[in-house]
Image (cartoon, helix red, strand yellow):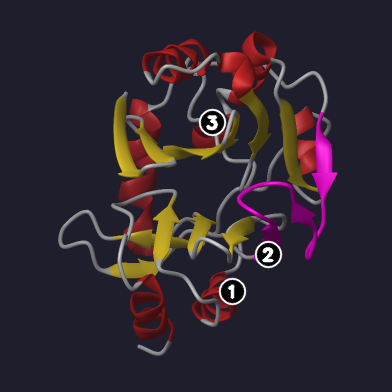
Amino acid sequence: MDVIELLPRLHLLRFPVGQAYLWRDGDELTLVDAGPAGYGAPIAEAVSALGRDPRDVRRIVLTHFHEDHVGGAGEFAALSGAEVLVHRLDAPVVRGEVPGPAPVFEDWERPLYEQAAKLLPKGGFVRPSGVTELSDGEVLDVGGGAHVVHVPGHTHGSIALHLPEHGVLFTGDTVAASPVDGTVMPGVLNLDRPAVLAACRRLAELDAEVACFGHGDPVTRRAAEALRAMAHA
């Protein structure tokens, strides 16, 4: 797992599949997504290496239910005592009450899925002992007020998290960056691609200087321009 500083208070945690983000507010930390199963302890070690106690992480905000984002959440929550938050439509999947619906593949996406599946741990993962449900428009006590933006399409309960005071936007898998040239693009492996495109247009309307994706390198300058170019391509 790679740990990369993006801003003095923002670090990227990169896994074999996908990535998470660690945000700092004074003595309090927030984890946005939690990587695949087996990464609870490595995340705790990374927090310690940054000079913080894992118990300083007060919350884990999950952008959606896919295993490469939630697999480490239960493990890390057990280690840190962090609250786990997820949109109400994805919460039953995270709790293990219902199976998550499979993506509707475009033909060209199937090899991407098969490649990613080879890199994910086999078997189940530790479910969080409790989940707090989120809804569109809620404001969390993160970064001076983090706005929950419901962006269905990748999953029914996909969310983005917008910190307008800092110009930071966490998009989850609704938006991605190409591993080839870094081009900002709509996410892949979706339930409803037209809904994802509509969600991308919604996110492009936000005033973001920094955009943090679930896959691909973040945009750390003038992100709104890149998002608008994607939305209107």
Quadrant location of residue 58? top right
**Is residue 13 magenta-colored?**
no
Q: Nearer the viewer, mark 1 or mark 2?
A: 2
Q: CA distance from mark 1 to mark 2?
A: 9 Å
Residue topped by disc 3 = 34
Specify whether residue 203 is in view. Answer: yes
Q: Position of residue 116 (x, y in %)?
A: 36, 37
Left or right of residue 216, residue 162 in this image: right
| Residue nearest the viewer, comparing 53 with 36 | 53
Residue range highlighted in magenta: 131-152
| Residue nearest the viewer, comparing 224 with 10 | 10
Q: CA distance from mark 3 to mark 1?
A: 23 Å
Q: Quadrant of the N terminus?
A: top left
Q: Position of residue 213 (x, y in %)?
A: 42, 54
Q: What amino acid type should be assigned to the residue bearing mark 2?
A: Val
Residue topped by disc 1 = 199
Dot 2: few (<14), some (14–19), or many (≥20) neighbours within 10 Å?
many
Residue topped by disc 2 = 149
Q: Position of residue 61 (x, y in %)?
A: 65, 40
Q: Secondary structure at mark 3?
A: loop
Residue at 54% x, 14% y is 53
> Sequence order check: which comes first, mark 1 or mark 2?
2
Residue at 44% x, 13% y is 48
Dot 1: few (<14), some (14–19), or many (≥20) neighbours within 10 Å?
many
Q: What amino acid type should be assigned to the residue bearing mark 3?
A: Ala
